Amino acid sequence: MYDVHLEVNGTRYGGFRSGEFTLSLEQMCNDFSLNYSDVWADDSRHAPIQEGDRCKLIVDDNTMIDGWVDVADGDYDATSWGLQVQGRSTACDLVDCSAMNEPGQWTNKTVPQIVADLVNPFAAVQLITLGEPGSNLGKFTLQRGETAGSAILRAARLRSFLVYTAGDTLVLAKVSATRTSTVLRRGQRILKAKKHASLQERYSDYYFKGQTRATDQVNGVAASQIRGDIEDHGVPRYRPLKVVAGGAEGPADLGARAIMERNQRAGRSERLSMKVEGWKTDEGYLWEPNILVRVTDDWHDIDQDMIVVSASFTFNGDTGSGGYTTMLEVCDPKAFDTGDVPLIRRRRRPTRVEIWAEAPAGQTVSPLVDIPGPLQSGIYTYREETRAAPQPSASHGRRHRRAHR
């Protein structure tokens, strides 16, 4: 049994028939939907809730969502009346609204500094950075018509930050090592589970291209044609994807972007959705994104630590009468890892990533380092050497494996 209230403009309301709220690692703002009955627990007036009101969704005196009422629909008949309320956390304005910062360009700033400037006009949104801010971005520029949320995500990807909301706070963070002692096991706490497996949004080769500002050391072709390539050896056939990425400082940035894109797409392609009893872990905390949990499901052949991507909490009947369940979406933690780690569904032999430099005419090409580090000026590419790699069909033409030219 959980004490669920919606606080609107400082007044708490209860007496809900049903409701749902979702916390997610992959959406910038969390959301809720509640259905009110015609009997209020704390207020006998008809629903004084309007769209645009400031609100807080509170569970057991913990603020789960701090934001705004988006929708307030009312209805009545001869014997009763009701109200359906939907809302989102304060970061919804970042998602919806254009970035109006002038001049809209940052030089030699960290990602948290850039995000703080983008968040600043939206006074209701608080910002926190967990962990190191990362190296400075040489130059970051807003795109025409870009929303603040889109710009924040674009900047965050350049330094492999996750962006999500906790209460009224926008969080920049890396993958957490926080672990719950709860074990989710088929036949015990799991009411039902569904495994999603798809290759539709997963590719065998990722080609990231971009440009960087010219300097005395890096200019001309070296600045205008940087790139980072990576392969996904869990994809059994030739499926290339080319991405034009702005804001990168050099091939190391694009290489990291390529790895992150590959890993997240691999993580999205294989996920487990589980409906579990109650809303809390064994430690007594509500489920939340970015924590590790042990999942043992022999039906889906899973026995490993998984990361919670999202948690959707639902109830039916007046609060206090039960019907509380949580829908958890989990995946392999490697999906949010920024390193070149083995991926799910590996079907090819192990490989290693190297950074190669384009050689001047008449010189040979040689590997520089295995991991991105201080690089010389020039054009670089990530190349993976494989043995017995599958070849593309004739319809794709000849597939060339070579350093970028």
Image (tube, rainbow, N blue to C red):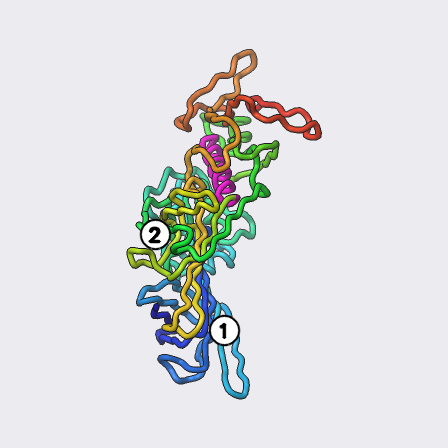
Q: Is residue 58 magenta?
A: no
Q: Is residue 78 above or below residue 163?
A: below
Give the magenta-colored segment's residue range. Answer: 249-269
Residue closest to the eye, 377 or 162: 162
Residue drawn at (32%, 67%), measured in percent from left and top?
60
Main SS type for the magenta part? helix
- Quarter containing the C terminus: top right
From this viewpoint, which residue is outermost toward the left?
A: 283
- Horizontally, residue 217 falls left or right of residue 143, namely left
Instruction: Identify the disc placed on residue 128.
Output: 2
Q: Is residue 357 above or below residue 171?
A: above
Q: Which residue is mark 1?
A: 84
Nearest to N terminus: mark 2 or mark 1: 1
Secondary element type, mark 1: strand
Residue 7 makes an appearance in the image: no
Q: Position of residue 102 (x, y in %)?
A: 47, 51
Residue 49 makes an appearance in the image: yes
